[in-house]
């Protein structure tokens, strides 16, 4: 692979060149086949080249490939927003806008939160990830490599510990840290919004403590502070439901969507309370490409396949296969730590004998697995957690084959 013309600041996990893919398999330009447990980092919940998505893209490409929605609306955008507002499980009527990416959705949510509340400060969480643009960088709860060498970032942004059974941080500890924040660092009247992932993606597939989410919802309701939930990675069936936030027992004010919304086409969305989404002046939201008709057509074809029944069946099948394997591996291999996450959104932690993160073990497994024909993706603050993101539509035998390959790599490491 000739990389001279590629920025050296892009870190490449797998130094191969892909040629084509089908459902949960991809092939490189040498013809080598891989089982894909990366899924384009959570974009391909419905698999590579999902036939209905491909058909919708092809049909739309012959009708209208682009029109800036701000200049003149087009059918696929209108249809998708109507479909999305029915798909998002909240008790209030929503309005929204489409974007090109997840980070752009987060950026726009920050603008909306500022515009609607007239306040500035945002509270995010340790280990969280919301994007690589300047404002979203500051939200990320991890410095290296994202925030290095880029200087001052848009703020103010503060971070709290992320309470989760997967991290061992309790609800009480997080609430105590919040008390401290508002007595030592920041006036609570200045807070526009809290932002979090219900299950952290980049952070290592860590599930938020529902008790904390409920306490936070009460706290915010009493003070006119917004809650922005980022379902960019956890949404569209990854946890076995449309979204992960209902298991927290709360509703967001603004919801961020992207990745598996459109079966591989670049698309994101911010949806939320109608009054909030009207807080900025006309022209305050928009973008030349956002809500591209082909991406919208792909999203409509994706959503048509995401019935609650399909999502539950796919999620449960994948979760069962993963949980039973990893429980066995935990007993067999001392370097396997926690199985993090919920549903089919699962992370496998690698630890040293003292329980500390073991990224070196993970790196060895990643390489060995690739050589055997299995693509894996790291995550976690120390990059010591393999996040499993195989398409939900993966054939049962391909899933088992992939888990067999992973098992062979673990046995070789023992
Ligand atoms: C939870 C979450 N939010 C935001 C983003 C940023 O999305 P994008 O890469 O499309 O800008 C990501 C990307 O991995 C993500 O996982």
Image (cartoon, rainbow, N blue to C red):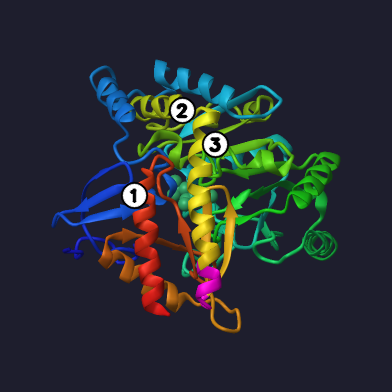
Residue marked by disc 2: 303
* Residue depth check, mark 3 versus mark 2: number of the one nearer the observer: 3
Residue 230 image offset from top left, x and y in percent: 58, 45
For this orientation, the residue located farthest to the left is 30
Rendering coords of residue 29 (x, y %): 15, 54
Q: Where on the picture, by quarter, is residue 377?
A: bottom left
**Mark with earlier residue (1, 2):** 2
How far apart are the two marked residues, 3 and 2, measured between alpha carbons? 14 Å
State yes or no: Cβ of the residue under disc 1 lies below 8 Å from any atom of ligand 1: no
Q: For mark 1, what is the residue?
A: 398
Determine crowd level at label 3: few under 14, some 14-19, many 20+ residues with C-alpha closer than 10 A: many
For residue 386, say whether it is visible: yes
Distance between mark 1 and mark 2 Cα atoms: 24 Å
Badge 3 or badge 2: first in the primary sequence:
2
Q: Which residues are magenta?
A: 329-335
Query: Where 63 falls versus 380 (above or below)?
Result: above
Q: Secondary structure at mark 2?
A: helix
Locate residue 26 relative to residue 401 in the image: left or right.
Answer: left
Q: Would you place residue 362 above or below residue 14 in this image?
A: below
- Kindly indicate whether the residue at mark 2 contacts the one at mark 1 (C-beta within 8 angstroms): no
Point out the frontmost of discs 1 and 2. 1
Q: Dot 3 corresponds to which residue?
A: 312
């Amino acid at each position: 692979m000739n990389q001279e013309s590629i920025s050296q600041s892009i870190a490449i996990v797998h130094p191969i060149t892909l040629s084509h893919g089908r459902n949960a398999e991809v092939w490189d330009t040498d013809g080598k086949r891989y089982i894909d447990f990366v899924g384009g980092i959570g974009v391909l919940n419905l698999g590579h080249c999902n036939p209905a998505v491909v058909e919708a893209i092809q049909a739309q490409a012959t009708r209208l490939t682009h029109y800036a929605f701000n200049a003149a609306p087009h059918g696929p955008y209108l249809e998708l927003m109507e479909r999305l507002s029915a798909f998002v499980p909240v008790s209030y009527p929503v309005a929204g806008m489409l974007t090109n990416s997840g980070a752009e959705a987060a950026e726009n949510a920050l603008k909306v939160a500022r515009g609607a509340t007239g306040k500035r400060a945002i509270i995010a969480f340790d280990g969280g990830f919301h994007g690589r643009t300047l404002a979203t960088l500051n939200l990320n709860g991890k410095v290296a490599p994202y925030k290095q060498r880029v200087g001052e970032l848009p703020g103010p942004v503060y971070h709290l510990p992320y309470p989760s059974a997967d991290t061992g941080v309790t609800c009480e500890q997080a609430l105590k840290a919040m008390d401290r924040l508002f007595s030592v660092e920041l006036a609570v009247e200045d807070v526009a919004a809290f932002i979090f992932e219900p299950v952290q993606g980049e952070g290592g597939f860590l599930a938020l403590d529902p008790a904390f989410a409920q306490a936070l919802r009460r706290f915010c309701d009493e003070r006119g502070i917004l809650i922005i939930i980022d379902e960019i990675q956890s949404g569209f069936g990854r946890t076995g439901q449309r979204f992960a936030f209902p298991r927290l027992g709360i509703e967001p004010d603004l919801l961020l969507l992207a990745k598996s919304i459109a079966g591989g086409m670049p698309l994101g969305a911010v949806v939320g309370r109608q009054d909030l989404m009207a807080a900025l002046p006309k022209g305050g939201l928009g973008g030349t490409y956002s809500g591209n008709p082909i991406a919208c057509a792909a999203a409509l074809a994706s959503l048509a396949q995401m019935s609650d029944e399909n999502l539950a069946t796919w999620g449960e099948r994948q979760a069962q296969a993963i949980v039973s394997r990893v429980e066995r591996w935990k007993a067999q291999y001392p370097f396997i730590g926690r199985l993090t996450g919920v549903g089919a959104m699962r992370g496998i932690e690698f630890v040293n004998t003292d329980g500390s993160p073991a990224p070196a073990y993970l790196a060895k497994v990643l390489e060995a697995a690739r050589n055997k024909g299995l693509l894996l993706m790291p995550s976690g603050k120390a990059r010591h957690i393999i996040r499993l993101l195989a398409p939900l539509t993966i054939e049962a035998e391909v899933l088992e084959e992939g888990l067999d390959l992973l098992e062979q790599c673990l046995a070789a490491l023992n």
